[in-house]
Image: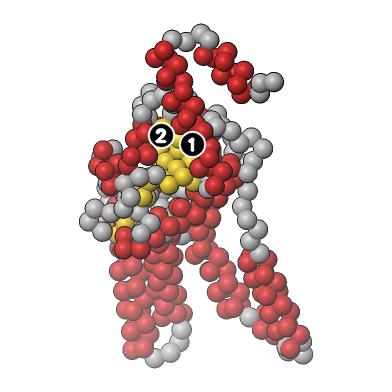
Amino acid sequence: MYGPRYLINLLLLSGVGGGEEKSFNLLAEKVEQLMEWSSRRSVIRMNGDKFRRFVKAPPRNYSVIVMFTALQPQRQCSVCRQANEEYQVLANSWRYSSAFSNKLFFTIVDYDEGADVFQQLNMNSAPTFMHFPPKGKPKRADTFDLQRIGFAAEQLAKWIADRTDVHIRVFRPPNYSGTIALALLVSLVGGLLYLRRNNLEFIYNKTGWAMAALCVVFAMTSGQMWNHIRGPPYAHKNPQNGQVSYIHGSSQAQFVAESHIILLLNAAITMGMVLLNEAATSKGDVGKRRIICLVGLGLVVFFFSFLLSIFRSKYHGYPYR
């Protein structure tokens, strides 16, 4: 008795000629090989030869997501490692989902294993995510806009759904670090309150509450919530010249390092304003107040100018200096 796979192949081959039969057999071999690799590892590592055979060359009736990266330690690409972790989460979510099929495969091409592929595609940055459709060449939208969107697994899954109609529900390994940190914080605060139960005047300390409020304001105005939602890289390193960029050149995106820089600048400007207010309202020595005023004014002028220059580098049409 014949199995279903044999019968399907027989029906398909009964209506095709010799050339089409050869193409069909080649496609079946490619799909079978990719499925075998996927059963061992969710992300298939490829060199130049494998990339040209399984991704570029026809026939192909499946989509391929390729991450072009540089993971070797000598490349010093921290962003590549962070993006690879998210990519692995996404590929594992697809591999172990009930909807897993041979319609989509996740692959990776490292620069040190496929430099010829980078040259062939005129690619000069890493990491880069590309979608290779079942038919035709990749279009502009088949290259993931990492600089604007970030490389979080959820964002990659949404992009893949737009390009392939394959919907992947991202499952992340359980992470209890946040729960543990919250429990430690609550225990610390509770222990402090218990030890100081006979002297709780510090709860009414306006300066302490003001500092806590400023920390929250600095975190929010520097874009920490955007980082949490979008998951951008910490910085960007150009693989060609090794230059590291901490400020994103577009107003639609940012790096994590950029938000830290903005936070420090806002804190310095606030400190300057506090010193100016102290110089104006205190009743101490006039000479000391004058020094405090000059220091505060210097902080405000210098760091606000620095902040404005960053703003102008991101909003290129901003006319003021």
Q: Position of residue 64 (x, y in %)?
A: 45, 35
Cα separation between marks 1 and 2 = 9 Å
Check contact, mark 1 vs mark 2: CB within 8 A.
Answer: yes
| Disc with the residue nearer the chain's start (1 vs 2) | 1
The one nearer the camera, 111 or 128, is 111
Q: Position of residue 208 (x, y in %)?
A: 59, 78
In the picture shown, does residue 189 fall above or below 311? below
Q: Is residue 163 visible?
A: no
Circle 2 packing at 10 Å, graded few (<14), some (14-19), many (20+), is some
Q: Is residue 195 visible?
A: yes
Left or right: 164, with 240 as reference point: right
Instruction: Please tell me which residue is depicted at 43% across the width and 10% down the height of the picture.
Output: 17
Q: Which residue is mark 2?
A: 54
Q: Position of residue 265 (x, y in %)?
A: 39, 67
Report the quarter where the C terminus lies: bottom left
Report the quarter where the N terminus lies: top right
Q: Position of residue 67 (x, y in %)?
A: 41, 45
Colour logic: secondary structure
The amino acid type found where label 1 is placed reads: Gln
Task: Residue 33: give its label.
Answer: 1
Circle 1 packing at 10 Å, graded few (<14), some (14-19), many (20+), is few
The one nearer the camera, 102 or 259, is 102
Rendered image quadrant of residue 76: bottom left
Instruction: Please tell me which residue is depicted at 30% across the width and 69% down the height of the picture.
Output: 302
In the picture shown, does residue 169 fall above or below 133? below
- Mark 1 or 2, closer to the camera: 1
Disc 1 secondary structure class:
helix
